[in-house]
Image (cartoon, rainbow, N blue to C red):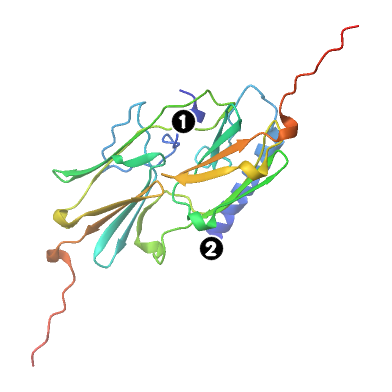
Amino acid sequence: MSVWESLREMDRLRQEMDRAFEGVAPWVKRPLVFLPAAGARQYPRVNITPTPEGYLVEALAPGVSPESLEVNLQGNVVTIAGEKPAPEGVQAAAFHRNERAAGRFIRTLELPQDLDPAKVRATYTDGLLRLALPRAEAAKPRRIAIDAG
Amino acid sequence: MSAIEKTVPDADAPTAAHELTRQTERYALPPVDIYEEADRLVVVADLPGVTKDGLTVEVEQGILTIEGRVDRSEAAEPLRREFTLTPFFRQFRITEAVDRNRIKASLRNGVLRLELPKSEAVLPRRIPVEC
């Protein structure tokens, strides 16, 4: 137990370090990591691609139970939450390897424009969550007629 | 290739001495859970983006090979990219104690589950005691 406690202590320290150094080197795209094995990554990882209608958000989330997936949208902010269950009923001693992370996650993404909640399409296939997020009517570009005097 | 482009942080993944890994740039090492149940070994691997058709699981000369191919086509360059779908490759040496003819594989939500039943010879057996 004390080993676990000190690991937790280490993790907390690392997180504090990461926070303290955030933004020091903006050209480094990857978050600074002080313990290389435990990257402070947001889960799930996402790709955001522009589409003619709006945006496509793809999240890399294998093994998440589809019932637990929850996508919320407010304005231009999308929240993805869910749970990746650990193998059930397996004693810790029975593991030869345990590399797959498990647990509950939540991630909030801010998109450049407001989105239309009524037209959002979400699919989850092959461990990829895909969200098609069309722009809100108000956020669409509008041509302004010019009065020539 | 920047670190952000890997699907799986393979450089960080632990590797064991008895595991054969062909680690080239083109492949990612999928993270796995391996655990033992009373009558079988279970291997669970995260293979996001791999479909049933793109997956090959083979046992040859005591080596279990998991290979997954992915569709890497993208409609447009992402505004923000945190991952690239990469093909997966990983090998394990399996023991004689596994019954290779009864290995079962299933793929669901990007997770491969392999069940490797222990062969009859190594299953515990209760010996009736005669008096």
Q: Are marks 1 and 2 on the same chain?
A: no
Q: Residue at x 83, y 13 (%)?
A: A146
Left or right: A17 with respect to B66?
right
Identify the secondary structure beneath mark 2.
Answer: loop
Q: Are there few (<14), some (14-19), or many (20+) residues within 10 Å of tag 2?
A: few
Q: Relative to residue B74, is residue A89 depicted above or below?
A: below
User: Is disc 1 in contact with disc 2, using a CB cutoff of under 8 Å?
Assistant: no
Residue B94 in sight from this viewpoint: yes
Q: Percent from the top left, x then y, of residue A27?
A: 63, 21
- What amino acid is found at the position of numbered circle 1 in the picture? Thr
Count of marks placed on residues: 2
CA separation, marks 1 and 2?
38 Å
The disc placed on residue A135 is none
Residue topped by disc 2: A1
The image quadrant where one finds the C terminus of chain B is bottom left
Q: Where residue B5 sits: x, y (%)?
A: 48, 28
Residue in front for this viewpoint, A113 or B19 = A113
Kind of residue sitting beneath label 2: Met
In screen coordinates, is B115 left or right of A132? left
Extreme bottom residue here?
A: B131
In the depicted view, which residue is nearer to us: A99 or A17?
A99
Residue extending furthest toward the top: A149
Residue A35 visible from this viewpoint? no
Chain of the residue that carries numbered disc 1 in the rendered image: B
What residue would you read off at disc 1?
A: B84
